[in-house]
Image (cartoon, rainbow, N blue to C red):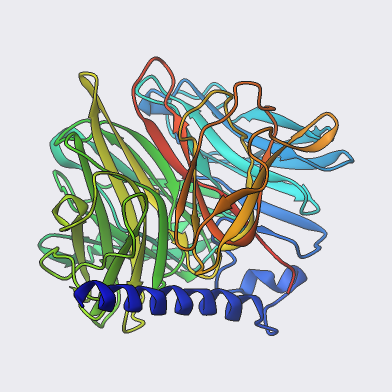
């Protein structure tokens, strides 16, 4: 009987999620053209089918003093004509710019540290039209990092998982790409509660510049839980986080743009549990009301979603976890009863529609070494039938892409890549079946094309990638795909 209640509750959840996706797609009031900047989801990583004269991409940036050997923006052009791009390099110095022409069905790589040995540089890419996509790539001896870029600025930015324990470092980088100064306030939350230091209020971000703040220097040193919120009181900005993990079970490097707003639902497709794995979902509630949260798991060996309650016990969908206002809650998935060991996907939902920010932290020990991968959740409302992977896939990579069917319907999907002859389906990855609320993990054929990849499905899906750290290092980083949002 308990299993039946779980299954019925799960089907209700999936049906409601599918309804949310469809409502989002049918919203006739969604802005088009230049007005898209005012959309509530416009600053989340995505590609729009709306035809515009130009599109912008704001990347996380790189700290020259952190040991990064090379920092690139990768500009992909899957189209049939030349793509014109303008790359701006913002720091504390006067802005620099470079023009680039990306040939059809190809990718250009622009180095943006440009010989600097100190300070932070943040690239912004302006494209003529909306065909192209942009990602950031850092080469770092402790593990290379591929990061998404945001397509818009925002008044608010949030970071759920911060970490400065045992010498680990964290920077918050605030970028103002506009010709007028911006004024921002920054707050942070630890296990002891929220703090609003006077020296982080009324920060002036000069026009077309980037400002870096070390969290240890502003009072958040040796913190294992550290959430941050940035709010612009004048202007709009982009905020990103640069992390170097070297202690308390974490090892690696991470750069990411923040989350521009709280939402009531977040998707993750690259979860994992095991004897050598610590997996955490970090939920941050910057609001003024408790968020009642449910987590549901999908994957091999899971016949229906398994929600968890505040004691990390498998329960019916009516039970929940409280994330109090102004607090951080870490959910350790290893403590979830009945959750099989291995790979899985997850959805985190606020049952009372109180928004929050959720990030996924995966630390694993492998072959005498270890790594940490930190990922933003995939935004509710951006689950899509089509996804693009600008940096492509490496031939021969195992478990390189994880795809979650977010609907209660059986569907199929095809993985294609852009090469000299245009879009071509990757052999062996055509019309693959995917069941209701199930996860597909893809191995990449050794002879797969190296261009931008597109995944097209008959059902709404969520997509994340596992990217190699290179340099002979074990493990991977996790990066979301770019959902394609239809013109509305």
Among the 4 quarters of the image, the one containing residue 273 = top left
Q: Can the viewer see residue 213 in this picture?
A: no
Q: Residue at x 27, y 76 (%)?
A: 4
Report x, y in % for residue 429.
63, 39
Q: Quadrant of the C terminus?
A: bottom right
Report x, y in % for residue 42.
59, 66
Residue lying at the far front of the rendered structure: 1
Looking at the rendered structure, the number of numbered marks drawn on it comes to 0
Q: Where is 227 relative to 24, above or below?
A: above
Report x, y in % for residue 108.
71, 30
Is 444 situated left or right of 450 in this image? left
Query: Which is more toward the observer, 9 or 254?
Result: 9
Q: Where is 33 relative to 191, above or below?
A: below
Is 122 situated left or right of 211 in this image? right
Q: Can the viewer see residue 47 in this picture?
A: yes
Q: Quadrant of the N terminus?
A: bottom left
Residue lying at the far right of the rendered structure: 81
Is 78 situated left or right of 57 in this image? right
Q: Residue at x 59, y 41 (%)?
A: 135
Q: Where is 387 relative to 436, above or below?
A: above
Query: Which is more toward the observer, 199 or 139?
Result: 139
Q: Where is 185 relative to 350, above or below?
A: above
Report x, y in % for residue 403.
50, 50
Q: Residue at x 62, y 54 (%)?
A: 412
Among the 4 quarters of the image, the one containing residue 191 = bottom left
Query: Which is more toward the observer, 19 or 359?
Result: 19
């Amino acid at each position: 009987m308990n299993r039946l209640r779980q299954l019925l509750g799960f089907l209700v959840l999936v049906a409601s999620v599918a309804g949310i996706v469809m409502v989002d797609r049918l919203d006739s009031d969604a802005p088009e053209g230049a007005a898209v900047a005012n959309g509530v989801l416009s600053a989340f990583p995505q590609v729009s089918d709306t035809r515009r004269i130009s599109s912008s991409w704001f990347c996380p940036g790189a700290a020259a003093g952190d040991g990064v050997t090379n920092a690139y923006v990768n500009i992909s052009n899957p189209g049939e004509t030349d793509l014109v791009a303008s790359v701006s390099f913002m720091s504390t110095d006067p802005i620099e710019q470079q023009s680039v022409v990306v040939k059809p069905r190809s990718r250009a790589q622009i180095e943006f540290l440009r010989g600097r040995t100190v300070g932070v540089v943040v690239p912004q890419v302006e494209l003529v039209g909306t065909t192209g996509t942009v990602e950031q790539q850092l080469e770092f001896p402790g593990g290379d990092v591929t990061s998404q870029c945001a397509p818009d600025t925002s008044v608010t930015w949030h970071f759920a998982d911060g970490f400065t324990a045992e010498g680990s470092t964290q920077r918050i980088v605030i970028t103002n790409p506009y010709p007028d100064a911006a004024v921002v306030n920054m707050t942070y939350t630890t296990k002891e509660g929220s703090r609003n230091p006077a020296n982080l209020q009324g920060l002036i971000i000069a026009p077309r510049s980037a400002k870096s703040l070390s969290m240890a220097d502003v009072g958040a040193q040796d913190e294992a839980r550290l959430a941050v919120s940035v709010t612009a009181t004048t202007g709009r900005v982009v905020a990103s986080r640069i992390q170097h993990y070297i202690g308390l079970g974490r090892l690696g490097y991470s750069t990411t743009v923040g989350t521009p707003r709280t939402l009531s639902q977040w998707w993750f497709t690259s979860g994992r549990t095991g004897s050598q794995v610590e997996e955490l979902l970090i939920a941050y509630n910057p609001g003024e009301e408790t968020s009642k949260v449910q987590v549901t798991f999908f994957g091999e060996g899971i016949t229906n979603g398994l929600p968890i309650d505040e004691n990390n016990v498998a329960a019916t969908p009516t039970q929940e976890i409280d994330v109090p206002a102004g607090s951080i809650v870490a959910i350790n998935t290893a403590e979830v009863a009945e959750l099989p060991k291995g790979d899985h996907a997850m959805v985190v939902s606020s049952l009372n529609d109180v928004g929050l920010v959720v990030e996924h932290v995966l630390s694993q020990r492998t072959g005498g070494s270890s790594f940490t991968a930190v990922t933003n959740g995939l935004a509710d409302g951006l689950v899509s039938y089509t996804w693009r992977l600008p940096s492509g896939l490496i031939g021969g990579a195992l478990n390189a892409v994880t795809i979650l069917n977010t609907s209660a319907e059986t569907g199929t999907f095809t993985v294609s890549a852009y090469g000299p002859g245009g879009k071509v389906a990757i052999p062996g990855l055509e019309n693959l079946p995917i069941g209701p609320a199930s996860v597909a993990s893809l191995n990449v054929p050794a002879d797969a094309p190296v261009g931008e990849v597109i995944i097209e499905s008959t059902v709404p899906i969520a997509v994340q990638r596992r990217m190699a750290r290179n340099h002979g290092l074990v493990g991977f980083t996790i990066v979301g795909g770019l959902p394609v949002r239809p013109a509305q």
